[in-house]
Image: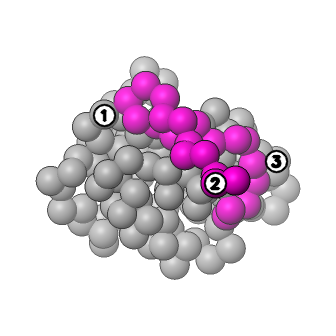
Amino acid sequence: MADKAPVLLSGGNPQIAKGYGDAPVQAYIAAMPGWKSHAWRRLDKLIERVVPGVRKAVKWNSPLYGAGHPGEPADSWFLSIHCFDKYIKVAFFRGQSLDPVPPVASKSGDTRYFHIHEQDDVDEALFAGWVKQAAALPGEKM
């Protein structure tokens, strides 16, 4: 019996079962439609290099990344992603504290977004800087 292809929710976001660790995140990345899978696979590896021992999970059909600071709740995260039709939305939960501040505001005062479109040439040095700064801050409990 062949594995069923993952269901894509609205905007092409993969429906992946909740899970902790790298495996569910890699399943999510593999299920991302089109160019998004390749683009995020590269940035997932960059996050692993910038934050050795990064914790990962998939909750609410979105990968989450955490630094696991001592004394911090296990479900604390600094970044998440979500697929939309035309872009990947990266959420930095303490984004307002990053320098420079990621470009897209959110309705919650502290979260900032970075959108990645197919034609974008992501500045990996800038992205790595945001990840490093975000991982050093207290995570958002989710």
**Disc 3 on helix, strand or loop?**
loop
Circle 3 residue: 73
Disc 3/disc 2 C-alpha distance (Å) = 38 Å
* Residue 2 tag number: 2
Rendered view: 126 above or below 3: below
Colour option used: one colour
Mark 3 crowdedness (10 Å alpha carbons): few <14, some 14-19, many ≥20: some
User: Based on the displayed image, in which of its 4 quarters is residue 12 positioned?
Assistant: top left
Give yes or no for contact between labels 1 and 3 (Cβ–Cβ under 8 Å): no
Residue placed most toward the observer, 118 or 114 = 118
Left or right: 36, with 110 as reference point: left
Amino acid type at image mark 2? Ala
Left or right: 114, with 93 as reference point: left
User: Can residue 119 be found in the magenta stretch?
Assistant: no
Mark 2 crowdedness (10 Å alpha carbons): few <14, some 14-19, many ≥20: few
Disc 1/disc 3 C-alpha distance (Å) = 33 Å
Amino acid type at image mark 1? Asp
User: Based on the displayed image, in which of its 4 quarters is residue 135 positioned?
Assistant: bottom right
Q: Position of residue 105 (x, y in %)?
A: 34, 31
**Disc 1 on helix, strand or loop?**
loop
